[in-house]
Image: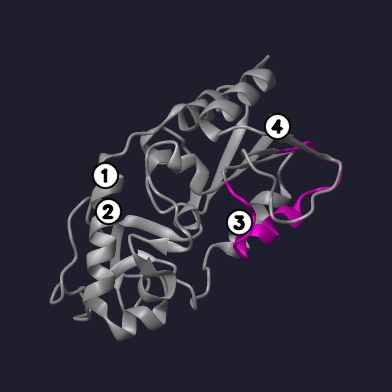
Amino acid sequence: MQHIVLLTGAGISADSGLKTFRDAGGLWEGHRIDEVASIDGWNQDKQKVLNFYNRRREQASKAKPNEAHHSITKLEKKYRVSVITQNVDDLHERAGNSTVLHLHGLLREARSEVDETLITDIGANAINIGDFSEDGSQLRPNIVWFGEPVPNIEKASYIVAEADILMVVGTSLAVYPAASLIHYTKKSIPKYIVDPKLPEISLSDEWTHIQNKAKAGLPELVNQLIK
């Protein structure tokens, strides 16, 4: 059975109504990225960071998977499918996508600010100052921030290296190290990018660009592959 690997980004979640910071001039809800999405921002003002992610967690819990997410579930009926996502929502899982690797963490999880292995599923609940992990340290969002290593990047590179077909959906390939994953593919495998805009890096002629939003372009591609 052929192995299809999808690298998904903010565009697939945007089609479910979740905002992307790059579309807002580099701001998330009026905040600079370094204020709310960096380890320095956390150390400087934990309450601001918690408030920001509490709002994002609530928003994500109300969003629903769109046609792109559901098309991946459809694809699993004929192919072995692995999803590597830069997104921190759980829309892939709620759509029934069975194999999902989150590069940048999950909104619905909290973890110890000291021990990254102590993770708690909190659903849509808020994290407050004074909420502690089992090791007695403050809980923080289980999100990989700027200035922190990406623990799953090595695992992701191995998955991409095993791909027979690669699909890049809803990402401009501007954020590293995630963008570097496309360089781990085997030579000459089919490669597709689904996004209204051209990526911010140069791609070789072996790439097929489907210039459409994820919720329209990906189901179209999936139907072609299934046929």
Regarding mark 2 in the picture, which secondary structure is present there?
helix
Q: Which residue is mark 4?
A: 2
Taking the image as shown, residue 162 lies to the left or right of residue 89, namely right
Type of amino acid under label 4: Gln
Q: Which residue is mark 3?
A: 156
Q: Quadrant of residue 118?
A: bottom left
Residue found at the far left of this picture: 130
Tell me, yes or no, whether the two marked residues, 3 and 4, touch with CB atoms within 8 Å: no
Figure label count = 4
Q: Point out residue 111 in the picture as x, y percentages from the top left corner.
A: 30, 69
Q: Point out residue 135 in the picture as x, y percentages from the top left corner.
A: 22, 79
Residue found at the far top of this picture: 227
Q: Residue placed at 36% from the left, 79% from the top?
A: 41
Q: Which residue is mark 1?
A: 61
* Mark closer to the chain start, 3 or 2: 2
Q: Quick one: label 3, few (<14), some, or many (20+) residues within 10 Å?
A: many
Toward the viewer: 205 or 90? 205
Q: Quick one: label 2, few (<14), some, or many (20+) residues within 10 Å?
A: many
Q: Quadrant of residue 112?
A: bottom left
Q: CA distance from mark 4 to mark 2?
A: 35 Å
Q: Residue placed at 33% from the left, 79% from the top?
A: 42
Front disc: 4 or 2: 2
Tell me, yes or no, whether the two marked residues, 2 and 1, touch with CB atoms within 8 Å: yes
Type of amino acid under label 3: Ala
* Mark closer to the chain start, 3 or 4: 4
* Vertical comparison of 6 with 173: above or below: above
Q: Which residue is mark 2?
A: 57
Q: Looking at the figure, which quarter contains the N terminus?
A: top right
Q: CA distance from mark 2 to mark 1?
A: 6 Å
Q: Which residues are magenta?
A: 171-192
User: Can residue 120 be seen in this snapshot?
Assistant: no
